[in-house]
Image (tube, grey):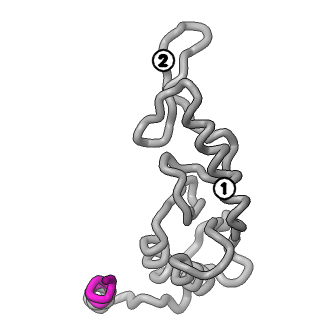
Amino acid sequence: MNFGSEKPVFIYFKGAGRATAARVALFNAFGENGWENKMLPYQEFADQKAIWQKSLDAPNVINADGTKQVKDEETGDMKSVKNDYGGSLLQTPLGYLPQLHFGGKIITQSAAIARWAAGLGEKPLMPKDHFERLECEVWKCQNRN
């Protein structure tokens, strides 16, 4: 597995919780220094959420892909541009945590991140065999509630 020199950046609250499985899987897949575990104190999250919210309150339309509609200064036509969410760390249309920044994408949902990372690395946490992996998924689904 070669992802180049880019390190995944995982952003979640400081402390345990839903992200623990994702952190374990990312550590197993990328090693101690192969990824960044950015742990936000709750106050920093609140500050980032306020910046993010202010960017949504600006006079623009947010598209489903996270881009925003702005008026072209020269033509007056509306155009789609990347939304930087006011510079907030919360770089998704819904402002969710956790976030995994990697490969030019931003992924949310801790269970999805954990399952993805669990299949990576020299000794993956999930089986490589498709049917064995399916059995693990069945077990996870049965024990979700």
Give the residue furthest to the top.
75
Residue at label 1?
Answer: 46
Q: What's the residue at 59%, 80% (across, down)?
A: 23
Q: Percent from the top left, x then y, of residue 2? A: 58, 72
Front residue of this view, candidates 23 and 116: 23
**Against 113, is 128 above or below?**
below
Region of the chain picked out in magenta, as a range: 137-145
Instruction: Say which of marks 1 and 2 sits in front.
Output: 1
Q: What's the residue at 49%, 12% (across, down)?
A: 77
Front residue of this view, candidates 46 and 124: 46
* Callout 2 crowding tier (Cα within 10 Å): few <14, some 14–19, many ≥20: some
- Determine which of the numbered discs, if any, sits on residue 101 in the image: none
Quadrant (top left/top right/bottom left/bottom right) for the N terminus: bottom right
**Against 2, is 52 above or below?**
above
Front residue of this view, candidates 69 and 121: 69
Residue at label 2?
Answer: 78
Q: Would you say residue 144 sits in the magenta stretch?
A: yes
Q: Percent from the top left, x then y, of residue 32? A: 71, 83
Judged from the image, the secondary structure of the residue bearing numbered disc 2 is strand
Judged from the image, the secondary structure of the residue bearing numbered disc 1 is helix
Q: CA distance from mark 1 to mark 2?
A: 32 Å
* Callout 1 crowding tier (Cα within 10 Å): few <14, some 14–19, many ≥20: few
Q: How many marks?
A: 2
Q: Hey, what amino acid is under mark 2?
A: Met
